Image (cartoon, rainbow, N blue to C red):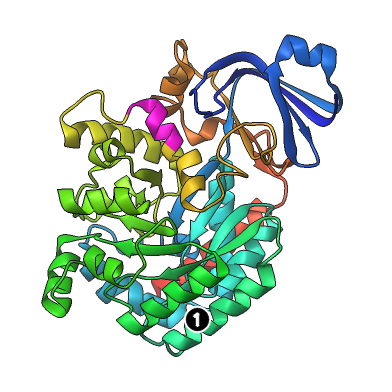
């Protein structure tokens, strides 16, 4: 077997249907795709590779999928902490956005976010923010994979004047990136309270025609549900279902306010839930019933949300929080086990974005989006079960190597395509403007 690259690792978690935990295995890669996953002893005999990497003491996992972000908001990290959601939005974040957000802001913020995410093992993210064409450009330059949201809101901003204007710009984005190897698009209506029925229906029609997902904040807070009942006479999920948006193409973010009937609706329609545990905790938004959703057969993915409300883009940390919170909320120590948390951060996220045939697991034929963590640090030794050590003990500082489509974007903990000094200097300059 001829390969461009052969990676030997002491442990591999392929996140395959059997949830295997492999020791002393190797991954063979050619033309950016995985050729084979096989024992290292066999690989040394059967694979002729142009380059061989030995990773003793390392764990190899699929690239992490951050299924909900506002990447450019990394420049607002710590700007308005310790506030409830609506106060945070209306009195701080939205005014700052009206004043400062432009193409240059989004470029600088996205570059900072991409640097942070890649260094933490995130190879793909699903974004919702203004100037998405800038987000797409910066992400592609970084060699990273993303689903870029074609954002829609009813109110005017510096980016667009109306819902129709947002949609028109989104369609132009779709046309520009329709065949790009790293960038896909999704419709991203902000929330039911920010988009009226008519544009939501148009989004549904266009999403069906273009075969792209819909990414939306939904049932984030109790106040959102109360507002919907007052304004529309129904809960937000019911309204979206009536408008035809609830189905296999929907990635519903947060979902902290759910009753049994709504969980059944999600399961029956094949809609996906994106859980953002740390953002929900910080904003006191509520608790997503992850264990009940998983038991009902709902696909639950994992997201960090934006760094302005988290305050980091650390999906390893989100895995740990999701597993621990799932146990606490359900009252069962067996709820949301480590293997489930890892699936939420990999294959479940890929499935929510319609990318599970390409990414999310280490299997022959899939893209070589891979992450290697050095587990020889004291706080991850001794090692009995790799998946438990990954979820409950490992940190993003242990991410040493990252590949996207077989191209190395993090080497020995350092980025290969992003200038760290320039990126941080730019972020500090933006901080001076926003602080004034």
Residue 378 appears in the figure: yes
* Relative vertical location of residue 385 with respect to residue 99 in this rendering, above or below: above
Q: Position of residue 396 (x, y in %)?
A: 50, 36
Above or below, 10 against 4 in this view is above
From the viewer's perspective, is residue 212 above or below residue 436?
A: above
Find residue 80 and report its horizontal and vertical position in percent: 30, 64
Tell whether 50 sits left or right of 223.
Answer: right
Query: Image quadrant for the C terminus?
Result: bottom left
Residue under the point 61% across and 74% down: 173
Graded by Cα atoms within 10 Å as few (under 14), some (14 to 19) or many (20 or more), the crowding at tag 1 reads many
Is residue 158 shown left or right of residue 246?
A: right
Residue interval drawn in magenta: 337-343
Q: Residue at x 35, y 58 (%)?
A: 252
Task: Describe residue 47's horizontal placement relative to residue 407 as left or right.
Answer: right
Circle 1 is placed at which residue position? 167
Q: Nearer the viewer, residue 211 or 404?
A: 211
Q: What quarter of the picture does the N terminus occupy? A: top right
Q: Could you tell me residue 98's position as x and y percent?
A: 40, 82
**Whether residue 159 can be seen here:** no
Q: Residue at x 34, y 57 (%)?
A: 253
Specify whether residue 370 is painted magenta: no
Can you say whether 206 is above or below 50 in the image? below
Chief secondary structure of the magenta span?
A: helix
């Amino acid at each position: 077997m001829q390969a461009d690259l052969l990676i030997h690792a002491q442990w591999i978690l392929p996140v395959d249907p059997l949830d295997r935990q492999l020791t002393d295995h190797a991954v063979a890669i050619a033309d950016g795709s995985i050729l084979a996953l096989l024992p290292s002893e066999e690989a040394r005999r059967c694979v002729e590779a142009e380059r061989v990497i030995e990773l003793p003491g390392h764990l190899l996992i699929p690239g992490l999928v951050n299924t909900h972000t506002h990447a450019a908001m990394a420049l607002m990290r710590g700007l308005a902490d310790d506030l409830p959601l609506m106060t945070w939005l209306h009195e701080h974040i939205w005014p700052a956005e009206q004043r400062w957000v432009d193409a240059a802001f989004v470029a600088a913020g996205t570059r900072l976010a991409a640097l942070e995410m890649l260094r933490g093992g995130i190879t793909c993210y699903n974004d919702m923010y203004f100037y998405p064409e800038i987000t797409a450009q910066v992400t592609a330059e970084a060699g990273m994979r993303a689903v870029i949201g074609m954002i829609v809101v009813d109110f005017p901003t510096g980016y667009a004047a109306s819902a129709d204007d947002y949609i028109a710009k989104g369609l132009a984005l779709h046309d520009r990136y329709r065949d790009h190897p790293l960038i896909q698009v999704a419709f991203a209506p902000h929330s039911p309270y920010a988009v009226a029925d008519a544009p939501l229906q148009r989004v549904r029609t266009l999403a069906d025609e273009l075969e792209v997902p819909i990414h939306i904040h939904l049932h984030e807070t109790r106040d959102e549900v109360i507002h919907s009942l007052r304004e529309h006479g129904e809960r937000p999920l019911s309204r979206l279902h009536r408008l035809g948006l609830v189905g296999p193409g929907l990635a519903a973010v947060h979902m902290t306010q759910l009753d049994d009937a709504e969980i059944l609706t999600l399961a029956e329609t094949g809609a996906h839930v994106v859980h953002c545990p740390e953002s929900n905790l910080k904003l006191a938004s509520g608790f997503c019933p992850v264990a009940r959703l998983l038991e009902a057969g709902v696909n639950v993915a994992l997201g960090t949300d934006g760094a302005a409300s988290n305050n980091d883009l650390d999906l390893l940390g989100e895995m740990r929080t999701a597993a621990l919170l799932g146990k606490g909320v359900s009252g069962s120590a067996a709820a949301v086990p480590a293997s489930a948390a890892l699936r939420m951060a990999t294959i479940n996220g890929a499935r929510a974005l319609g990318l599970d045939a390409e990414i999310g697991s280490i299997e022959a034929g899939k893209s070589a989006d891979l992450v290697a963590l050095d587990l020889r640090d004291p706080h991850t030794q001794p090692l009995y079960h790799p998946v438990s050590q990954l979820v409950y003990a490992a940190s993003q500082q242990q991410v040493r190597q990252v590949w996207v489509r077989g191209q190395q974007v993090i080497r020995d903990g350092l980025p290969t395509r992003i200038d760290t000094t320039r990126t941080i200097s730019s972020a500090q300059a933006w901080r001076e403007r926003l602080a004034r």
